[in-house]
Amino acid sequence: MSVAEQYVRQQPVTSILNDPEKLLEEYLPLIRYHADQLMRRTPDSIELDDLINAGVLGLLDGAQRFDSGRDVQFKTFVSYRVRGSMIDYLRAFDWMPRSLRDSSKQLQRAFLELEQMHGRPAEENEIAIHLGVGLDEYRQRLDQVRMMSVVHFDDLPSINGGDDELSVLEVLEGDPGMMPEQQTAINQFIGRLAEAIEKLPKREAVLLTLYYYEELTMKEIALILGLTESRVSQIHSQMVVRLRGILELD
């Protein structure tokens, strides 16, 4: 069971969906968990309470939208709604300057050019040399772009199926009435994502699993890998930039 799931007690969902007070009491720890995770990758100007308030709105919206007839658990559905609402709040500030986006794109190009040159994922010293900077400066750039690792569903490719486009969230909702063309498009997307992850260096793949699947904190991962928390954060940024580049290339 993941850390986030442990925050949610096993009370029947149907008994609290129509009771906002009980719903909030039950899922507030989950909201705080996601807020704490996002705060690690946002500027100091962002307040924790503001993220929590945005998460509460996402929870209430998720409770209204949830369809118990679909093949998806409420805690899974609402987790994405809560996190998505928080990131919508962050994006409303437009707090990532153009220079930061350009720096991320430059790193993506460097990863791809070196991989095409060597036929394998580029190592950080090779990337630094390719960019004409020292290793310390390269790691500083990773620290700067770490904020762009806050991923929202709208940042991911839409999934074309027939005449419609499906968001990743709609896929997670698991509509049983989905057309065959849509299901084919979803399977293709999942295949692309799996192939992109397989191209990651081993340490980045391990970090991806520990952070997004096991839901460990950066501090916990640092203890497991025998690294500093700052170094783990840099590797995470490197992994996200590399993964984005692979998906955009495909």
Image (cartoon, rainbow, N blue to C red):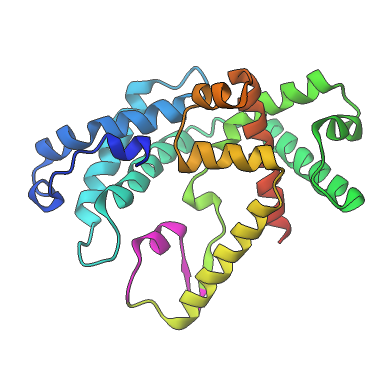
- The image position of residue 50, as x and y in percent, is 34, 26
Q: Please report the residue visible at 34 percent of the width from the left and 42 percent of the height from the top.
A: 1
Residue 231 visible? The answer is yes
Q: Please report the residue visible at 41 percent of the width from the left and 81 percent of the height from the top.
A: 179
Which quadrant would residue 83 be assigned to in this image? top left
Residue 219 as seen in the image, left or right of residue 250 = left
Give the camera-side residue of 113 and 232. Answer: 232
- The image position of residue 97, as x and y in percent, is 63, 31
State the extent of the magenta-drawn residues as a range: 161-176
Give the camera-side residue of 64 and 197. Answer: 197
Q: In the image, is residue 49 above or below residue 110?
A: above
Magenta span includes 165:
yes
Q: Please report the residue visible at 38 percent of the width from the left and 33 percent of the height from the top.
A: 34
Residue 124 as seen in the image, left or right of residue 96 = right
Q: In the image, is residue 171 above or below residue 98?
A: below
- The image position of residue 206, as x and y in percent, is 60, 40
- The image position of residue 170, as x and y in percent, is 39, 62
Magenta span includes 115:
no
Residue 97 visible? The answer is no
Q: In the image, is residue 23 above or below residue 33?
A: below
Q: Please report the residue visible at 54 percent of the width from the left and 27 percent of the height from the top.
A: 221
Which quadrant would residue 104 be assigned to in this image? top right
